[in-house]
Image (spheres, rainbow, N blue to C red):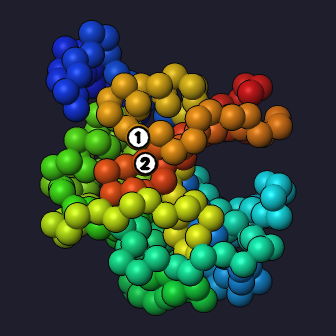
Amino acid sequence: MITESFAGRLVYGQAFTEPFPMPFAKDFFDVGLFTNKADALRAYYSDLGLPFDHTLKLGGGVLQHRYQADQAVLKINDARAPLPPRIDNSPLAELIIASPKCTVPTTGVDPDGTPVRVVPPGHEGVEGLAMRLKVASLQTSRQFYMEALGLNEVSPGVMACGRSLLLLEETGIPPQPAAPLATLGLRYLTLQVSDCDASYAKALQAGATSGRAPETLGNTARIAFVFDPDGVWIEISERASVTGKAV
């Protein structure tokens, strides 16, 4: 949980006059990907030791197959329509999975070409899911994730959302324009919060760019999206099954 106050600090050229917490509803972020090879991906991640939880119908010809990694969720978005190809040199550079089946860290690629590293739970602090993220500027990204989204920095370039880790790797290469969300491969991170609208507004106030304004998905969740400085989609989700309250 984030308890540090940002009262009176300058954030992206603005000064807050009140505390800026991001009230996370769980101590892990989730990870979303898109695919046209759902059967192959489901078999791949099942073999790595991720148990299947359930499938959601998202609409627009997309089914979401949800796999558990501790309390984190890997969301395999199964698109009926052909998707744009996977992005070369995507900022979302490597998915890291802590699997009870793993005794020695291994690396590989999933059927869509996404780099995947599997480690024993607790290896180098990894629990559930972690992500290696290539960033143009380490300082800019550190500031964004701490001050717009409320993550902690646990060591230089290592950000924590509760027990999930985001590993920042500076490239110095200017970011490319954000690609559409529904594109093959790793596409977004999800932060589960207790109030989507308030968290989204705070993120924008701190300098985040809007990707999608808050909307309600039936009785399941209220969600919004913002972009990080490198064009990564970040979902801010108030999910009823996590918060315990209706949306």
Contact check, label 2 and label 1, Cβ < 8 Å:
yes
Residue 69 image offset from top left, x and y in percent: 58, 63
Neighbour tally class for label 2: few under 14, some 14-19, many 20 plus, Cα within 10 Å: some
Using the rendered image of the protein, determine whether residue 162 is visible from the camera's viewpoint. no
198 to the left or right of 65: left
Disc number at residue 18?
none
Q: Quadrant of residue 219?
A: top right
Count of picture labels: 2
78 is higher (above) or lower (below) than 204: below
Q: Would you say 114 lies left or right of 60 here?
A: left
Residue annotated with mark 2:
227
Q: Residues within 10 Å of mark 1 (few under 14, many from 20)?
A: some
Q: Position of residue 98 (x, y in %)?
A: 47, 70
Percent coordinates x, y for residue 181 in the rendering: 57, 60
SS type, badge 1: strand
Outermost residue on the top side: it is 17
Q: Residue at x 39, y 61 (%)?
A: 177
67 over 158 or under it: above or below? below
Query: Which residue is tagged 1?
Result: 209
Spatial distance from mark 2 to mark 1, Cα to Cα? 5 Å
Is residue 2 depicted above or below 143 in this figure? Answer: above
> Residue placed at 47% from the left, 39% from the top?
210
Q: Earlier in the sequence, mark 2 or mark 1?
A: 1
Instruction: Give left or right: position of 23 versus 75.
Output: left
Give the residue type at disc 1: Thr
Q: Kindly identify the residue that appears in the image at 41 percent across and 87 percent down.
A: 106
Q: Please indicate, yes or no, whether residue 131 appears anywhere in the rendered image.
A: yes
Amino acid type of disc 2? Phe
